[in-house]
Image (spheres, rainbow, N blue to C red):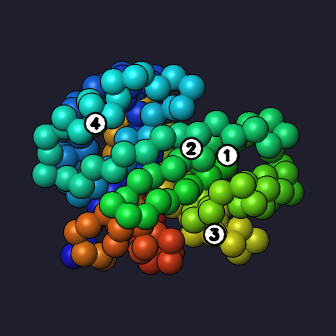
């Protein structure tokens, strides 16, 4: 089944402007089949899990967290929970103000800390083609990192997979998806 999804969204459970239900509704209105709530670790509100699980939607809803990882400064890594599996994505490479050699070094360092599965080659949903290079050995995903309704729907991935969380995770890990942009 061909599906459209975003694996990096924020809600009022951290620094987003929309509640989890409002985020889900906004993506569902744009024809998405799955999203991941990935609120920031250091801002996460205690009731977030209950709010995520209370969302009513026809979409597949992943629960995750955007981890702040200190590696000669900081980077962000999304840890996204499937049913039995987890996905790790190094986020928004273009937002760290680093040269390419430094980005490559950070990616490799993070890969020693987490079972890194992919890297995000967008910044707030805008394409950063300079990171779509073979020197980055991980699958490269597009995401909009939405914090507001305006940010919803700028970039996404599409994939063909059975309609369950772990199948989606496996396709991403294998690089079996397409990155798409408005």
Residues marked 3 and 2 touching at CB (< 8 Å): no
Task: State the quadrant of the N terminus.
Answer: bottom left
Residue at 48%, 41% in the rendered image:
65
In percent of width and height, residue 93 lies at: 66, 49
* The one of 149 and 74 positioned closer to us in this rendering: 74
Query: What residue is shown with label 2?
Result: 123
State which mark lies toward you, 3 or 2: 3
Task: Check whether the beta carbons of the residues at disc 2 and disc 1 lie within 8 A of each other.
Answer: yes
Instruction: State the SS at label 3.
Output: loop
Q: Secondary structure at mark 2?
A: strand
Residue under numbered circle 3: 138
Question: Separation of disc 3 and disc 2 at Cα?
Answer: 17 Å
Q: Residue at x 25, y 75 (%)?
A: 162
CA gap, disc 4 and disc 2: 24 Å
**Mark 1 → mark 3, Cα distance in angstroms:** 16 Å
- Closer to us: mark 4 or mark 2? 4
Lower position in the chain sequence, tag 3 or tag 2? 2
Q: Which residue is mark 1?
A: 94
* 3 vs 4, front mark: 4
Q: Nearer the viewer, residue 125 or 54?
A: 54
Q: CA distance from mark 2 to mark 1?
A: 6 Å
Q: How many marks?
A: 4
Q: Which x, y percent locates residue 161? A: 29, 76
Disc nearest the viewer among 1 and 3: 3
Q: Which residue is mark 4?
A: 52
- Determine which quarter of the picture holds residue 168: bottom left
Mark 4 or mark 1, which is nearer to you?
A: 4
Sequence-first disc among 4 and 1: 4
């Amino acid at each position: 089944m061909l599906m459209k999804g975003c694996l990096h969204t924020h809600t009022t459970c951290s620094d987003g402007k929309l509640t989890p239900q409002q985020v889900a509704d906004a993506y569902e209105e744009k024809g998405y089949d799955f999203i991941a709530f990935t609120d920031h670790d250091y801002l996460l509100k205690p009731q977030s899990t209950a709010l995520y699980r209370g969302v009513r939607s026809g979409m597949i809803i992943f629960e995750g967290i955007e981890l702040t990882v200190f590696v000669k400064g900081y980077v962000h890594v999304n840890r996204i929970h499937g049913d039995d599996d987890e996905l790790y994505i190094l986020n928004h490479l273009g937002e760290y103000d680093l040269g390419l050699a430094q980005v490559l070094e950070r990616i490799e360092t993070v890969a020693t800390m987490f079972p890194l599965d992919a890297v995000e080659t967008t910044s707030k949903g805008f394409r950063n083609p300079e990171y779509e290079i073979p020197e980055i050995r991980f699958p490269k995903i597009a995401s909009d990192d939405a914090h507001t309704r305006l940010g919803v729907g700028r970039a996404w991935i599409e994939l063909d997979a059975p309609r369950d969380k772990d199948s989606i995770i496996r396709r991403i890990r294998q690089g079996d998806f397409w990155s798409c942009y408005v």
